[in-house]
Image: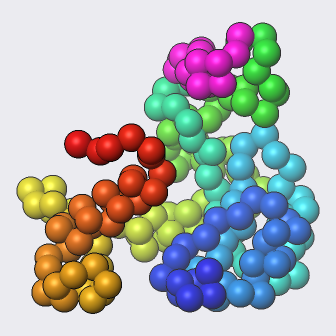
Amino acid sequence: LKLFGSELLVLCSEPHLLGRLATIIPQPSLFAELRPGHDTTPLLSICDELGIAPVATGEVCMLYPEDADAYRMLRAIDRNARLSDLPDWELRSGDHCLTSEDQMRRRYPHCPQAVDNTVKLAGRCFTEWDFSTTIFPGINANPAYGETNRNAEAQLRQLVYEGAARRYPTPLP
C-alpha cells in the first residue's frame, strides 16, 4: 500500500483499520465507507478526528431488490450449505442493490457529504475503455525469462505456465 497508495482508492468500513490505514495511505486516496445496515457513528467520528472523507455505498451484491432470494441461493451453493445454514453475515436484503443518487440521499440523510463524495469518487474512477483490443499490464522484461524484447502476452503466458507447473503435479497441455 505504501508503494501504490497514491494510485489506489481505498474504502474501509472498519474504524480501527481506518485509523491504521490513515498512517500509510494519503488522504486523497483513503475513504470511510458507510454501508447500509451498519452503525455509522463510530466511522463518522474517526472521519472527523482524522480528516478522512466518508463515502456512501450500497454494499451492492445484486442488481434489483427482487434478486435477494437468488443471491442467497448462490451463497448457499458457493458454501455447499443449506439456506438455513448460512451465517447471518451472508444474508443480504434487497437493500443491497444498485440505487439512484436520490435513494442514497434518503438512505444517508444524516451525512449528505458522503453521497457528494461518492459522486466525486465515481468521477475519479471513470475512464473510457477500448474493448476492441486486448490490454495487458506492462511487464518489465526480465532476462531470467528469456529475451528482453519479448512482448507482454508471450511473457505472461510463460509466467502462467511456470506457475502452473509449480502448483500441479500432472503434465500440462
Q: Position of residue 2 (x, y in %)?
A: 63, 87
Tell me the quadrant of the picture where the C terminus can be found. Answer: top left
Label tally: 0
Residue 95, placed above or below residue 29: above
Q: Residue at x 55, y 73 (%)?
A: 9
- Of 149 and 143, the residue lying toward us: 143
Instruction: State left or right for residue 140 relative to residue 29.
Output: left
Pick whichever, 48 or 84, lies toward us.
Answer: 84
The residue nearer to you, when weighing 114 against 2, is 2
Q: Is residue 76 magenta?
A: yes
Quarter of the rendering containing residue 124: bottom left
Q: Is residue 68 magenta?
A: yes
User: Residue 94: percent from the left, percent from the top?
Assistant: 62, 26
Residue drawn at (45%, 57%) of the image = 166
Frontmost residue, 14 versus 159: 159
User: Over which residues does the magenta segment extend?
Assistant: 66-82
Percent of width and height locating residue 154? 17, 68
Where is the N terminus found, in terms of image quarters?
Answer: bottom right
